[in-house]
Amino acid sequence: MTPTKLAGSLRFLIILCAVLAIVSSSSKMINSDLAKGDMEAYLHAARLILAGQDIYATPSRPLDMGGLYYIYPPALAVLFIPFTLVPVKVAIVAWTIINVALLGWVIKALHEAMTGIPWSELPSSDRWIIIFFSLLPPSRFVLHHLFYGQSNILIMALAVLGLTQVRRNSFSGGIACGLSIAIKTLTFPFGFWLVLRKNLRAVAGVMAGIAAGLLLPALVLGFSRNWNYLVFWFKDIVLYPDLTRAKVPLSVNVSVQAQLYRFFGNGIAYTYKGEPRFLTLFHVPEDALRIAEQALVLAMLLTIAAYWYRFRNSGELVSNWGGVALTFSLLAVFTPFAQKHYLVFLLPAFVYIVHVWRGLQLRDRWFRGVVIASFILLVFTNEEFCGELLGGIFTGAGCMAWGTLLASGAIFRAGDCLSEPGKLPS
């Protein structure tokens, strides 16, 4: 197939998939008899703000009808106020289109920043190949995200905006990263990454962005109410002490922390025919599991620090963008309450991996083997391919987490190869 025909085929396939994703996910939320995903919680909180009521006090509808509590800082609820001014159906479609557009922008912005080549100057076939193979591994998680109107794509896009702008203006780039953290704390490791990079202006920008994201809602809420919300959110949500009794059921938690309780505690691994099933290998004392759970966040940060130290003297692609890709992949499953839609954070990691594989033509067999193994675990272990029983076993065994960790390993391997003379084709 010629490059022109390949580009045309991929363009048609990607546009078709985007349209189908928008239509199917919007229809799912619009026609749902139960809650319309997390977007319902965001809209509910925004309406409570307009009504002068407590955004954390009531679920979006009765819990037995699928209602959800709003569990984020006030900023996200404030951002959703404009969506309350239009019919719910219009808001759902608009939010879905915004998310799909942001996915495309993330790929474009990251590739331009990594390579220094304007997106428009790439051959058409290259652009569509990059989009297709970057989206393919996390595709099931992107669809899950869209089906429930989640906000992680917005958070990811804000972080990418900041990280790509840091090169031009460290402070303003840091502000965008800080806003991402303030809206939803998942991207906090990037503050740590910028500290490791010794970019003090960017770190100052992160602090300013966090402060702005937490305090600017006071312009709408009033300082006292906003402050009370922040205190409640920090004490009753951020510091919630027990993973096994959290609002996110352990059976749908895909974090590495949750895997501890499935393998070494009494955590439900999966449900089959309405019955809970377990994959306990052996029991570890509950106190030890709780210590290990807390230590895993530190392990994530130490892994990021190890990458920085190992490749700090390498070129920008490895020392900076490899670290960015690694951080995105790790935060996807080291957040204690991770669910499937958190794995949309794998997209930047695979933009990097696709560039290394195809753009730089790295032919290292370990790199390629680990990438392929990651792809298999991420894509082919769900119920659509394996059926309900095997899909449940694979989920309970942590295949999504292991696939994500393999992607992280591939980024480490790429760093070793790209830092070693003679590994790339001449």
Image (spheres, grey):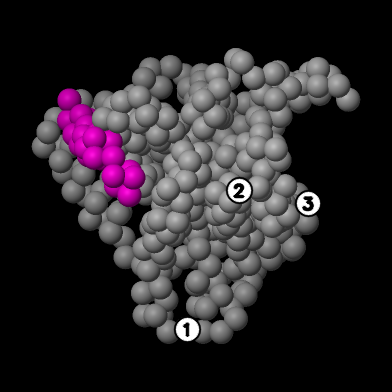
Which residue sits at x=70%, y=18%?
124
Q: Which residue is mark 1?
A: 284
Q: Position of residue 362 (x, y in %)?
A: 68, 44
Quarter of the image holding residue 370?
bottom right
Amino acid type, mark 1: Val
Q: Position of residue 408 (x, y in %)?
A: 55, 54
For this rendering, which residue is in front, 167 or 400? 167
Query: Distance of mark 3 from mark 1, alpha carbons?
Result: 33 Å
Disc with the residue nearer the chain's start (3 vs 1) = 1
- Name the side, left or right, on which 283 lies relative to 355: left
Which residue sits at x=22%, y=49%?
232
Observer able to see residue 108: yes
| Residues at circles 3 and 1 in contact by the CB criterion of under 8 Å | no
How many neighbours does mark 1 have within 10 angstroms: few (below 14), some (14-19), or many (20 or more)?
some
User: How many numbered marks have been drawn onto this rendered protein structure?
Assistant: 3
State yes or no: residue 203 in magenta.
yes
Check the image and report above or below for 222 versus 38: above
Q: Which residue is mark 2?
A: 421
State yes or no: residue 334 in magenta.
no
Magenta extent: 194-219
Mark sitting on residue 385: 3
Query: Distance of mark 2 from mark 1, alpha carbons?
Result: 46 Å
Which residue sits at x=24%, y=35%?
201
